[in-house]
Image (cartoon, rainbow, N blue to C red):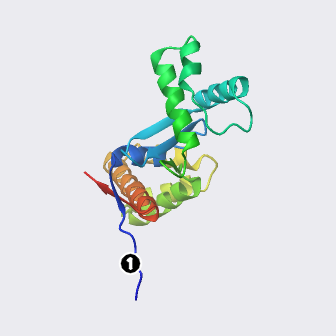
Amino acid sequence: MMEATPSPRKLKIDLDDLVDIFDSNDPMLTYYLDLEDGQIILVTEDTHRHLNSIYDEYFDEDQVDIDLQPILDELDLSAWECEELLNAHRAERDVGERYLRIPAAETRQGYQDMEAFIETVKDPRLKMRLEQSIQKRGAFRNFKDALIAYPTERERWFAFKKAQMNERVLAWLGDEDIEPIQ
C-alpha cells in the first residue's frame, strides 16, 4: 500500500512582502515566517545583539526554558522595543518549529535574471549595452543605469524581475510544504 504524502500546510501569506524580502540582501536583517499565522517577523542585528546581551546577563548558558517578559518589565524599554525583543526571542527559539527563516536573495540568481532578461531584449543596441554592463564591476548598478534611457524596457525589467522572484518564493514555499492562500 502506498503511503499518502501529507498535504501542504495552507497559510495566509503576503506574497508581495515575501518577494521583497527575497529580493533584499541586507545582512543586518533576518526575517522569519510564522507558520501559525503567516506573519513575517523582522529581527535586526541590533535587536539580536540586545537580546543576546539580555541572555548573557540574566540567564545561565545552558538554560532552555526562558521567560523573557519579567526581565523586559524590569528594563527601561519602550513598548515597541519590548515587542521587538519578544518577537525575536520567539522566532529565534522556535525556528524550525513555529518559525521558518526566510532566505535572502543570492547574488548569483540576480545575475542570472539579468542574463535571462537580456535574451528577451529585441533592440540590438540596448542588448549590446546590457551585455557589456554586466561584464564589468558593479554589474547590477551598470545594468540599471543602462536601462534609464529606455523607460519601457526598464519597466519590463522590473516586471520580469518580480516574476522571477515570485517563482522563487513559490518554489521555496513548495519546498517547505506550504501552500499560500489569499
SS type, badge 1: loop
Image quadrant in which the N terminus is located: bottom left
* Residue 111 position within the rendered picture, expressed as x and y whole percent measured from the top left: 54, 57
Q: Residue furthest bottom?
A: 1
For residue 49, side relative to residue 88 (left or right): right
Q: Residue furthest left?
A: 182
For residue 181, side relative to residue 132 (left or right): left
Kindly identify which residue carries mark 1. Answer: 4
Q: Nearer the viewer, residue 71 or 174?
A: 71
* Residue 67 position within the rendered picture, expressed as x and y whole percent measured from the top left: 57, 29
Label count reads 1
Is residue 53 positioned above or below 36 on the image? above
Q: Nearer the viewer, residue 64 or 134?
A: 64
Q: Residue at x 50, y 41 (%)?
A: 31
Q: Residue furthest top?
A: 76
Q: Residue at x 42, y 59 (%)?
A: 173
* Residue 56 position within the rendered picture, expressed as x and y whole percent measured from the top left: 72, 27
Q: Residue furthest right?
A: 61
Q: Residue at x 50, y 62 (%)?
A: 115
* Residue 179 position within the rendered picture, expressed as x and y whole percent measured from the top left: 34, 60
Task: Using a 10 Å C-alpha cutoff, classify the residue at mark 1 as few (fewer than 14 neighbours), some (14 to 19) or many (20 or more).
Answer: few
Q: Nearer the viewer, residue 50 or 6?
A: 6
Q: Amino acid under label 1?
A: Ala
Q: Nearer the viewer, residue 17 or 150?
A: 17
Q: Residue at x 36, y 44 (%)?
A: 37
